[in-house]
Amino acid sequence: MWLRAIPVTEAQWGDYGDTISLLAGDLNERVPAVKREIEGKIIVPGSAGLVQSLLNAGFVDAINMIIHPVILGSGKRYLDCMTANKDLKLIGTQLYETSGSTRLRYEVVK
C-alpha cells in the first residue's frame, strides 16, 4: 500500500469517528501490528488489489461477495493474481429479491 498514514474521520460510506485509518508500509508488518492494536474486525470494502494481497499473505479470515445478475463480455477479474488456491467454506447466504443479487459469506479455510 502506498498511501500516507492519515486518520480519516468520515468516509464516503459513512461517519465512523476515529475507527478508520489509511495505512502505509509493508502489509506483512502493518496488518499484524494493527491486529494487535485494535479489538474487532478489519474490514476492506472493495479494492480487488488489496484483497488479493491480503489473501495471498494469509490475513483474510472471511469473504463477503455480492453476485449481481449481469453478464459482462469483458472486464477485470476480481481475484486474478492469486499466488495459491484458497479453500472457502460457505457460512451464509442472503438473496436480495428486488435486484436478484445474492450475498455469499465464506470463511477462509486455514
Image (tube, grey):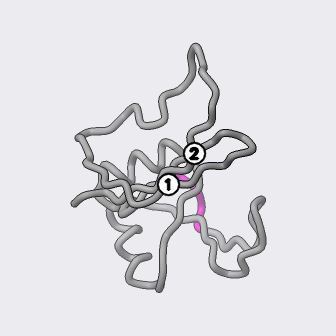
Residue 61 image offset from top left, x and y in percent? 36, 63
Secondary structure beneath dot 2 equals strand
Give the amino acid at mark 1: Thr
Residue 27 image offset from top left, x and y in percent? 39, 59
Residue 105 image offset from top left, x and y in percent? 46, 56
- The answer to whether 39 is drawn above or below residue 103 in the figure is below
- The answer to whether 97 is drawn above or below residue 58 in the figure is above
Left-right relation of 96 to 66:
right
Q: Name the residue under label 1.
A: 93
- Give the residues in magenta: 1-5
Quick one: label 2 or label 1, which is nearer the N terminus? 1
Are there few (<14), some (14-19), or many (20+) residues within 10 Å of tag 1? some
2 in the magenta segment: yes
- The answer to whether 4 is drawn above or below residue 53 in the figure is below
Secondary structure beneath dot 1 equals strand
Q: Mark 2 points at which residue?
A: 102
- Is residue 8 or residue 86 the one in the foreground? 86
Give the amino acid at mark 2: Thr
